[in-house]
Image (cartoon, rainbow, N blue to C red):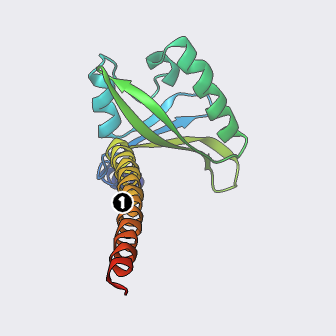
Amino acid sequence: MKRVQARIAQQESSLNALINTTLDNIVLLDRRYHILVANEAVRQRYSSYGFALRPGTSVFDVMSEEQARVWREYYDQALTGQRLNFSGLRIDHDSVHFIDYWVNPIFAPDQSIVGVSVFSRDVTDRVVADRALRESEGKLRQLNESLEKVVRERTAQVRTNISALRATLEP
């Protein structure tokens, strides 16, 4: 019995070490939407709002009614075997974050679905950089078009001047 308990403790320790090596948010739910595991990153985020994510807590206890309605649909889809990946916005303490989400079924060894895993990653820096890059590319394109126009106008002017000069130099 002690060996089994030691093995379970070791596996639990390994799982905690693994899920806490990332800044991504990780939550595992059972089929009744109760939290099985929440990594340190997501626990800290919810703690800043006064919520404690503990095993056995209903995930809907930390959501507004509207959020619960939307997320129940995602969880239900995962509980039917679907894998979801989508992006969304999240407002944390008056700042907007761009988030990528993965909502997936958790399979038991017999392939029955026993829960849902939710991974989320803050991609705000990447989205802001992409937008800045697109804006820079647009400005560069406009500058290039303006330069091409000036070159065409100046070339036409030089040709006109050369033609006029030739006309005055020809006998």
User: Which residue occupies the foreground of this view, 84 or 6?
Assistant: 84
Farthest residue, direction top: 65
Asked which secondary structure carries label 1, the reply is helix
The residue identified by callout 1 is 150
Which residue does the image show at 52% across and 20% down from the upper left? 60
Position of 81 with respect to 53 (left or right) is: right
Rendered position, 116 above or below 56: below
Q: Is residue 13 visible in the rendered structure shown here? A: yes
Which residue does the image show at 47% across and 18% down from the upper left? 63
User: Which residue occupies the foreground of this view, 83 or 153?
Assistant: 153
Q: Amino acid at mark 1?
A: Val
Q: Is residue 53 visible in the rendered structure shown here? A: no
Position of 19 with respect to 113 (left or right) is: left
| Horizontal and vertical percent position of residue 18 | 34, 55
Which residue does the image show at 37% across and 33% down from the upper left? 97
Position of 14 with respect to 68 (left or right) is: left
| Horizontal and vertical percent position of residue 112 | 70, 48
Rendered position, 2 above or below 39: below
Which residue does the image show at 62% across and 26% down from the upper left? 72
| Horizontal and vertical percent position of residue 3 | 38, 57
Farthest residue, direction front: 171
User: Which residue occupies the foreground of this view, 153 or 165?
Assistant: 165
User: Which residue occupies the foreground of this view, 63 or 167?
Assistant: 167
Counting other residues with Cα less than 10 Å from the Cα at mark 1, is it few (<14), some (14-19), or many (20 or more)? few
Q: How many marks?
A: 1
Farthest residue, direction right: 80
Position of the C terminus, as image quadrant, is bottom left
